[in-house]
Amino acid sequence: MAKTYAIILAGGAGTRFWPASRARRPKQLLALAGSGGEPLIAATVRRILPLCPPERILVATGRHLVGETRAVLPDIPEANFLVEPCGRNTAPCIGWAAATIGRGDPDATIMVLPSDHHIGDEDRFRQTLARALAAAHTGAIATVGIAPTRPETGYGYIEMGERIREGVFRVVRFVEKPDPARAAAYAASGRHLWNSGMFFFQPRTMSSAIRAHLPALADGIDRLDRAAERGEEQAELERTFGSLPSVSIDYAVMEKTDGALVVPGDFGWNDIGSWQSAWDLAPKDEAENAAPEWTLLVDARGNLVRDLRSGPEGRIIALVGVRDLALIATDDALLVIPRDRAQDVRSAIDALKARGASDKL
Amino acid sequence: MAKTYAIILAGGAGTRFWPASRARRPKQLLALAGSGGEPLIAATVRRILPLCPPERILVATGRHLVGETRAVLPDIPEANFLVEPCGRNTAPCIGWAAATIGRGDPDATIMVLPSDHHIGDEDRFRQTLARALAAAHTGAIATVGIAPTRPETGYGYIEMGERIREGVFRVVRFVEKPDPARAAAYAASGRHLWNSGMFFFQPRTMSSAIRAHLPALADGIDRLDRAAERGEEQAELERTFGSLPSVSIDYAVMEKTDGALVVPGDFGWNDIGSWQSAWDLAPKDEAENAAPEWTLLVDARGNLVRDLRSGPEGRIIALVGVRDLALIATDDALLVIPRDRAQDVRSAIDALKARGASDKL
């Protein structure tokens, strides 16, 4: 039986959760799902341990994040952190990580998982992963698609085709984020799934696909591979990585690959895309407020309060007569925004950049 | 020419500006009028200096406030702070302060002024005070009334009668805070003025009025007076003050006094009754936000931001897409409330009391 490996993608910047998320403390390091204090990436690793032991879990992250990331994943061996010298989107990272695994275990079955999603039903999640891993073991690139629950324009979609076997379908095509009309059609079609960003393959399958569709990346990965065999990977990485094509695996490979498979999943998936999603997931009081227990709430309804400040206990946050706000407090920033405008956090980031307040980003 | 004295009433609790105002930092110690960092009581004293030198300004305050109050009024001699052992409303305080002045200068003309109001036109204010002082010099108790600009139910009213001379009228009656219908009638009548809480009299006039209408207070003040002549005022104050009738000068004396006079005033008076009033008075940007210059405002309109936190510079407050909120930050509390519900700050105070969080009051 082939061994299962995981590549956890943990390089994201995560501006949507400012001021909680920062360049050096992106979303995956935050406990956003309301489930105790577990950072999202720690939950990601914990969830897959029944499928994959820590020594076969690789974490791809950036140099500026590796310290904090290792701190919240104490069971992952130090050598399993693949540190990108700079961000080059997902294709170089996945290609490099897959080659690294393939050098040691050419028969590996690999799953690539985002580090910052929430999964409501972890048993069903693992059953879906196992099915996708089995599909990948046949030599295909497989993915997991989520049955749409709304005409979301913020996700890519996967169109399902022929059923291969129980719970496994051919991919007809990957579709970029649609406009509202097409999103509505997709959500109603029964044939379209949300692209969850999870990919499953053997090392040689991914290697061939990259060679076929993005030869410049394949050449770079070959150089890294040969350098690794000479024990000179780090120097080559510094030389090569920044020149690799910065492109997503979806665009570079998945959209162009014939024979991709998709496994529909239904396990309470939430990519926690904004403070609105964090509120959706959080435990709430009878007035729909998701707030620390000590918050003073007087005729306040539907609010999200998150206090990440350090320092003295016993500080009061009082909301009187306000509705549907998100209030996020950190040591150096305080944000107040209507929950349903949570996407506009980006405007605050833009304003901070315009002001040159890079220490707040 | 009789000398002018002032009694500044500076004992108030000021819960309406929580969390900026506290039991130990009431409203008059805050810079609420948006005019630089000048505490309201410091502005009160500065405004009257052309009429009355510091050595003739008495400040009546509570024991728990005397330290901070003296700190913001460095020019007032220490002996001029009359420290009430406990709060007994305004009548005992004014009676005691008037007797204290009268012992040294029986021919004094005294003005009693609140410590926590805003005056827009200080020249016209002083002209009005001078007129009221002149009226008091004739042996009457005089007051200043403000021409109503709206049917306010939160103030007492003064009904004007016969004109005595230029700008001086007889008082027909004092009226308690009216219901909305009567407030509307008063505001339209042309005969009703807002009671500004300023009173003008000679020591003997006030003494007689208290003797006539509140003999228990007159007896207590006599005891304090005799003790002061023996150099034992402090001990007597401790013994007596808490047993004096706790009642306002308006109710105890003004409403019952025949022959009171009123001087209409029009000098941009604002009693700064709530965060709403503070916003009214504050300088605002083109989107009607009254906020520190460094506040990050993105599509935010009509908000009031006040940051009284100590500690590191450079902390950000970001308001994105919110309207007409008041956000008040102190080291240990943060309040968010719609501006037009500013009166409901009391609800937060009540909730804090119910929670036993007396350190936050």
Image (spheres, coloured by chain):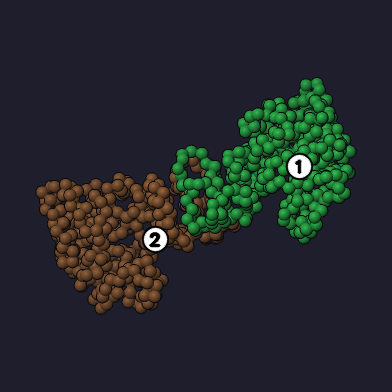
Chain colours: A brown, B green
Which kind of residue does numbered mark 2 sit on? Gly
| Chain on which label 2 sits | A
Residue A45: image location, x then y, percent: 31, 55
Mark 1 lies on residue = B128
Which kind of residue does numbered mark 1 sit on? Thr
Horizontal side, residue A234 vs residue A122: left or right: left
| Chain on which label 1 sits | B
Q: Secondary structure at mark 2?
A: loop
Pick the residue in front: A356 or A298. Answer: A356
Give a yes or no on whether discs 2 and 1 share a subunit. no
Where A260 falls versus B141 (above or below)? below
Where A156 falls versus A217 (above or below)? below
Q: Which mark is residue A347?
A: none
The residue located at (14%, 51%) in the rendering is: A228
Where B6 falls versus A180 (above or below)? above
Mark 2 lies on residue = A273
Pick the residue in front: B55 or A95. Answer: B55
Q: Is residue B260 visible?
A: yes
Of badges 2 and 1, nearer the viewer stands 1
Q: Is residue B355 visible?
A: no
Quadrant in which residue A164 is drawn: bottom left
The residue located at (83%, 34%) in the rendering is: B202
Horizontal side, residue B295 vs residue B64: left or right: left
Within 10 Å of the Cα at label 2, are there few (<14), some (14-19), or many (20+) other Cα atoms?
A: some
Residue A336: image location, x then y, percent: 49, 54
Residue A310: image location, x then y, percent: 45, 43
Quadrant in which residue B209 is drawn: top right
Task: Measure the C-alpha gap from mark 2 to mark 1.
Answer: 62 Å
**Dividing the image into 4 quarters, which one contains the N terminus of chain A?**
bottom left
